[in-house]
Image: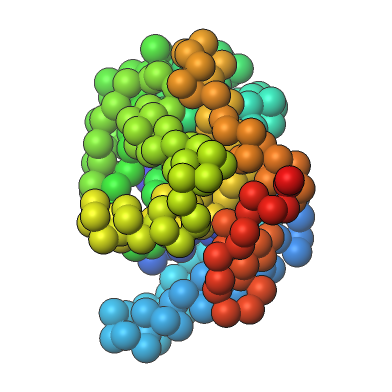
Amino acid sequence: MKNIAVIGAGTMGNGITHTFAQAGFKVQLIDLNETALTKAIATITKNLDRLVAKDKIDETKKTETLANISTFTSITEGVEYASLVVEAATENVDLKLKIFKQLDQACPEDTILATNTSSISITQIAAQTSRPDRVIGMHFMNPVPIMKLVEIITGYSTSKEVEEFIINLTTKIEKTPVIVNDYPGFVANRILMPMINEAIETLFTGVAGVKEIDTIMKLGMSHPMGPLELADFIGLDVCLSIMEVMHEGFKNPKYAPNPLLVNMVRAGKYGVKSGEGFYDYSKERKAVTVAAQFS
């Protein structure tokens, strides 16, 4: 395997690109938005500079990593020689299904198609292609260059050969693969998102404030980051999408997103990426009095 294409130049896409490129793979980063590609390369460069400053890599490795990356605004051109495609677009069912139809038509017949989805059915995605046996989930964790886990999700038709290949590839990029079955939210988000949703419920019902909830979970449960801060980091829009997928998939009211989460996303308060969520990131971080915003 020499060429890996990554679809989407956002946070996850640029992190996946960085990781494969640093491991020596040629990576074609694809996004329809040229500005997003420019921003992604700048982010990767900044992160590499940070590694150089910490003596994790040297300048030669940084230069080699950047040289391994090429950018494209056309899916057809970007995947022409890809042995593996990792889709890392927005967590939206319709968008992902559309992308996989395009990939199936544009990629060589033996190309493996992987998705970084954190909740959407691999089987549903694979059904949009003529190669469901070569479709698999590779759910990387954020920030990708640092986090070791990759949740590997096999669809109903994913072949054992593809599963084993992806497991081996994951270890080659110094990540830890963990195989899970294809159900809404898989394992990571099936456990994490209801906890975040419950933290929002706790805030919504006035039990405690933002800082208090996060402090209790950090000091009392040894979490490195409180659930509301983590939700901001993930993106409240992403959290909402995952909760909606699980709510629809399980038909269980316990997965219904809290009204406060819904309203915050409607108001464009996505967390870190929008500058404000449960915390204000425009200046020195401070807890936002969220309930007052929607009273």
Residue at 29 percent of width and 79 percent of height: 56
Residue 70 visible in the current orientation: no
Left/right of residue 206 with respect to residue 159 in the rendered view: right
Q: Quadrant of residue 53?
A: bottom left
Q: Position of residue 217 (x, y in %)?
A: 32, 53
Left/right of residue 140 with respect to residue 31 in the rendered view: left
Q: Is residue 63 above or below residue 234?
A: below
Left/right of residue 118 with respect to residue 74 in the rendered view: left
Residue at 61 percent of width and 62 percent of height: 288
Q: Position of residue 79 (x, y in %)?
A: 60, 43
Q: Position of residue 136 (x, y in %)?
A: 42, 28
Q: Is residue 51 above or below residue 219?
A: below
Q: Position of residue 195 (x, y in %)?
A: 39, 38
**Viewer-nearest residue: 225 or 132:** 225
Indicate the colouring scheme.
rainbow
Q: Is residue 113 above or below residue 217?
A: above
Q: Is residue 170 above or below residue 163?
A: below
Residue at 60 percent of width and 74 percent of height: 42
Tag count: 0
**Viewer-nearest residue: 148 or 20:** 148
Residue 291 visible in the current orientation: yes
Residue at 27 percent of width and 21 percent of height: 160
**Viewer-nearest residue: 73 or 56:** 56
